[in-house]
Image: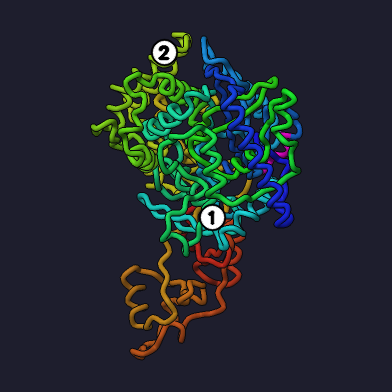
Amino acid sequence: MGDFNVRAILSESDRAQFYTAILRDLKALDLMLNEGLIDTASNTIGAEQEICIVNSDCDPSPIATDILERLDHPLFTNELALYNMEFNARPQKLKGSCFNKIEHEILSGLKRAEVLAEQYNSQLFLTGILPSLCFRHLRFEYMTPEERYKVLSREFLKLRGSHFEIFLQGVDDFSASLDSILFEACNTSFQLHLQIDPNEFAEMYNWAQMISGPVLSACTNAPFLFGKELWAENRIALFKQSLDTRNDKNHSRTILPRVYFGKQWLTQPLSSLWKEQVVRFPLLLSSDIPEDPIRQLQRGQIPNLRAIRLHNGTTYTWNRLCYGVHNNVAHVRIECRYLPAGPSVHDEIANFAFWIGLMKGMPQHSKGFWRNTTFKIAKNNFIKAARGGLHSVFHWFGKDYSAQNLILDHLLPLATQGLQRMNVSTSDIDLYLSTIEARVLSGQTGSMWHIQNHRALSQKYTPAISNKIIIQESLQYQKNNTPIHQWNQIQIASHNNVLKNRSHPLRIEEIMITDVISIKDNLSVAVAQKIMQWKSFNHLPVQNLQGQLVGMISTASFPAQPDGLLLVRDIMTTDVVCAAPHTTLKEAQDILDKHRINSIPVIEDGKLVGIVSSKDLTEI
């Protein structure tokens, strides 16, 4: 659940002392490995369910702390943003109906929280990235008021030395910057845990890396970011860039981002993963210095290695080494962090069973595969899966396979064998792996269902309204725990009343035009006049060379006989009436009427993000 008893580094002496504590922890870990003090069992699993909260209009609802306070439940905890929270399922032995038990526990936990959410006119929603998120939802007021998050954001930004930059290319492009780590709050995951025998850790960790791409391709559920259609699983690129402390001056070097897939196969003891993090990533947080772990071992007490675990919590590999202590027995786990939340709990558990089955189904002849396989094959497969989902083609032990053929013909049989080997019940195996099979056969992942319906809905509605319709439809399927391959295409005609019966007035961010054509203030009036004629525009926003909105020009502004040297800045109106994205439609209409104008530029954080006209308001 994370360590919340943290603080910023107070001084160079404080930093040095905490590094000393980290080195002691690593020494203790090596000692425990050498003396066989870490549990060699590999039959326990667990999961973490991250959750979005939306209000009745499908907007983010920042009420997580209110729900958590009233829940007062040890398995629920907060997340970075106030519209997210997390439920931690209890660990289960990998046998019998373990997956079914976890599914029912998560459903029960969600139902308990849902009752409280409804009292705030809100609902719980499972998705990789909430489609209705707007840029304003990344302001500090939406950050959970925990010292850990404030310190992390401040220290990440200090280390980077400039705003975090996000750039993704897909069907659309997205580019933005932010002065905090709240881009990361867009991501909602379903994280999996598998206990590993420390003697087999390197082999199993490398295998986890190898299967990551194919597994992800069948589970994508985050294709949109701020209304833009980008990757099949945008979380992968967004998470990496949202915490990237590298700056542009260093990109000529090979410097790992703090969110990364890996650089090479693991060939050393598992402690080398944490040592590599100390080598590559500066310390961000500190805390009270824990007791010397070597002395604890001498007393027969297993240390919790808090210092190195705290540092490990500020670096993010998609397959992560985790260490824990229970009843004075230490164990290690691999945490699978790349899978999204949703589309339904049943889908998530099917993903869980598929991953565990593959981890346990590694063929005997594949042992040591990494000695003859280039690491970049696994990394390339992972990136391709994030971009293309089930449309990807993977290189798999010397041959190329479509994602569907690889999963259906090779990986599902391995997963079945792996679960059978662990004595998982036949009913669990059949139920969950048949869900993966049906999903892959249909080609309908959460991402594909979202993309297809968004494209259809966008023929009639704005992207913002289309995404809210998709959330409304998804919520109904989620309440029934219907797997994604059984979700129907949305009937557009049934949503004619989508704009009615709202709890809050429509805002212009939901209807504004974002494909805004603007002109520079140094453009000649003759060219500006032609542009407006070609596009049948009555008005255009004017920006300077720095991209700031400096005026508006209208057809009424043009002189009868323009001088060929006359520039837009010479005739534009500089007293521009603007509005913010959260302005209601009624407020926008009042602005148009008061100033007797036909359109309003929409400005956010000083940037032009859209435009709304009297025609847009009339149509709505």
**Residue 375 location in percent, x, y?**
36, 39
**Residue for badge 2:** 430
| Residue for point 48% across, 27% down | 201
Is residue 598 at all visible to an observer of this figure? yes
Can residue 122 be seen at all in this image of the molecule?
no
Name the one closer to the observer, 384 or 28. 28
The label shown at residue 329 is none
Question: Residue 323: within the magenta?
Answer: no
x then y, percent, for residue 121: 66, 37
Label 1's element? loop
When the figure is inspected, residue 473 is found, relative to residue 540, above or below; the finding is above
Q: Main secondary structure of the magenta part?
A: helix
Instruction: Determine whether, in the image, residue 138 is placed left or right of residue 406.
Output: right
Magenta part of the chain: 61-68
Where 291 sits versus 238, above or below?
A: above
- Which image quarter holds the N terminus? top right
| Residue type at the position of mark 1 | Thr
Q: SS for tag 2?
A: helix
Q: Position of residue 515 (x, y in %)?
A: 41, 60
Using the image, determine if residue 321 lies above or below residue 537.
Answer: above
Q: Which residue is mark 1?
A: 245
Within the image, what quadrant is residue 245 found in?
bottom right
